[in-house]
Amino acid sequence: MNDNRPKRWTRTLDAVLAGVSILLLLIYLGVVYKNDRKYIADLADETITFMESVCQRYDNYELGNQAKTRQDLLEKAEVLTDFVARDQLANQDFLTEFARRGGLSGVLVLDSDQSEICGVDLDGRDAYALWKPKLEGASLKNIFEYPKKTYCGTMMSQDVTYEIACMAGGDVAVLCYIETRKIKTDVYEPSIDKILTNNTFHKNPVIIITDGMRILASNGKEIKQNIPVDKTPITNAGDLSHYEGRLIHLKRAHRSWYGKRAVYGRYYIYVFYPEKEVFTNMIALVLAGITVYAILCSFVLLLRQHSEKEYFRRERKQLNTVRAISSIYVTTAIFHLHRMEFEEILCSDRMKSFVGEKRDASEVVEILADHVIAPEFRKDYLDFMNPNTMRERLRGVKNRSAMFRDVNGTWYLCILIPQQIDENGEVRDVLVAARNVNDYKQNEERYKEELRKTARDAELANGVKSSFLRRMSHDVRTPVNGIRGMAVIAKRVASDPERVKECMDKIIFSSDYLQDLLDDILRMSKLESGEIAFEERTFNLKNILRDIKFFMEEQAEERKVHLTMNVDEITHSIVVGSPLHVRQIIQNLVSNAVKFNREDGRVNVNCREIGKVSEDGRVEYEFVIEDTGIGMTKEFQSHMFEVFTQEENTARTTYSGNGLGLLIAKELIDRMGGSVDFVSKRGFGTTFTVRLPMKVDFSQQEERREEEKKEFSIRGVRVLIAEDNELNMEIAKTLLEDEGAVITEAHDGKEAVEIFVNQEPGSFDVILMDIMMPEMDGLEASRKIRSLDRTDAQTIPIFAMTANAFIDDKKRSRLAGMNEHLSKPLDMQEVVKMIHCYCCADRS
């Protein structure tokens, strides 16, 4: 019974609060309703006052218009009586034309007996019959009794209102009249209807002005002017005179209005507001009141339910905690240390099979150590899980953990978490949880192994780096030493031309080797950084191979090696690809075959197509480079594609190779989607087989004619050379002047632009522009020249001279406006040929 009293008290309090709230809400609604009615009554009074002033202004305006109309009628009547002959007054055609031109509705001419002489009415009525009933009136009758007397006024005849003017003269009287609705008014003249439609009123009232019989003006869309008052639901409300000054509530045809009616002079003014406009504030305030009421009710409910929600929140929190632990840990239990009891919370089936119904904490630990834990971890497990020492080990700490492996090799993490601590700081209960961390442990082992591997790789990389620098130092210093030594010897034997020529040949040979070494190192750098760019352009594969044969024949002759090349089995020689890299691959392999050969050895190069052309126009080309050289051992073959790898270091002393050629060729073949195989035996030679896929260009398969060999002359060609290195400038100037060219020097890009600007257009035939220069580099200088506003700025050939010979370097020079790209050291025959083609082709 005691439990029910608080509930009954709560229900009683709820009922009282609800009743008080409803009463306050009703009072609130009454106040709002009264205020809205008072506000709309005041607003109607203001609108009526405004409309009264409008009617007053309109009446004043109408009086002026009426006087003007009457004066005009009177003047027309005077014209007819004083200036028109009697026979014309009897002429109906004359009167009709007069009325039409004068804007009259009609004219009636009477004699002294008030008999009709002649009459016309433009609306087709009988003018005499229209006005005969009015002739007996005192106003018109006196006109005939007193000649020259006039009458003007407004009369109604046959339910039509007219403005009339009558004048007697001699023995006749003339009556001119016009229907008031036909009086022409200016479209810009004010009227009550215009004022209503051109003004906006607060809360959109329906305003109607009547004369008691017809509607004179209204802003209602459905209420037309001049219709009877009984045709509108507002003006057809009966006698409203007893409501004067009070708010009227009208209900018509399921519609409702609140407003007022007022009488002003000859006008009846109605101002009524739609019900939805009257109580807009009330609706908003009622909604606000209901909202406040709902908020108060909700607040009360929240207060009442707070304790229950808090209880359920704690329950859900505990449930979620258990679920979370269950999803992470395979086993959870409580050790009650003060009783040395084991309480199961969540245990795996495997653990239950061993523990059963046992509740002694020490016994459970012993059972798990014997049946679950791997032998090598049992001692550590027993020490960690010992309930007798657990209280002391957990004093002052939040938790302790340890990792063990079970008999199946699975790793588990065991955690001890104090749960209850007494007033002396002693741990009474401990939560024990076990979690499977096998994946984590395996990942940790893999990570450690990766760290060890990374360390080994770093150590190996450092060794490779040291080896690279050591070999680079040797490979660079050796030809440099040869160049310097031959230069010293040449100076000493300057009087012996044969010895000087021999020294110069060796210097050139050493410099060629040094250039090849630098080119190979740059190519390797580009390959490793991924910056190498492959072209997609049309070229003649047979011509590339013939050029390689021509280039390598001199080297083969020097080493007394017989070089042959067979390209007859190539059917489609015009292909699309990267000719520079195809040349590098084949030339590197052929060069190695020549270098590492014996005297009277042979190098045979066979090229052919494999299979048919695919649907997308691709075909595979096979290049077989076979030599009778020294061959390679099996040990060397396993790492032959590594940096600076050579089987015999004696080759370095004779500049035969630098150990980069095979690696570069292999990288380029892989990047181009090809393959390379080899067969080699020590002392019997090596055979390389390279396969490269390329696309056939069928549009240009006819063999291109080889250019006829001819002498190229640049005699008289005016050349501007921009070069900051004095030695390079001297070499280029001397060689070009030997060919007959006229040279102008510029020692940086800025000076080259200034010289070109200061000379007359056409002063130079070609510009040789170094790329890397102080003040202004060659690319910027070329852009400056191309942007000049002169005739030769866009047409003069500009050739880049640079040690940067990669495809992306050529693209940059093209974008800067250069025509060709010449790689250093300059091949003077190629330079002369190129200048001739650009500057002298039209002369020959």
Image: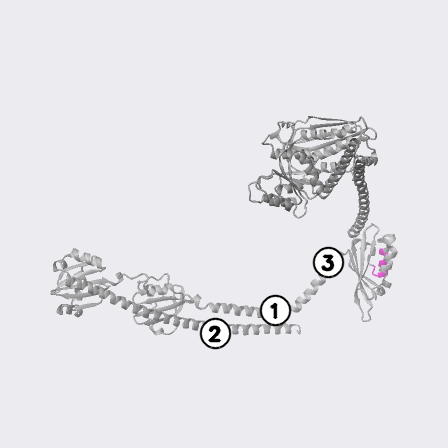
- Amino acid at the residue labelled 2: Val
Q: Is residue 175 visible?
A: no
- Mark 3 vs mark 1: give the one in front: 3
Q: Name the residue under label 2.
A: 31
Q: Is residue 364 magenta?
A: yes
Mark 1: few, some, or many residues within 10 Å (few <14, many ≥20)? few
Which SS class for mark 1?
helix
Q: Nearer the viewer, residue 599 or 690?
A: 599
Which residue, given by chain and number where applicable, does mark 1 sit on? Answer: 301
- Check the image and report above or below for 785 versus 554: below
Residue 324 tag number? 3
Q: Give yes or no for residue 186 being in the magenta stretch.
A: no
From the viewer's perspective, is 248 left or right of 144? right
The residue furthest top is 568
Looking at the rendered structure, the kind of residue marked 1 is Leu
What's the magenta region? 358-368
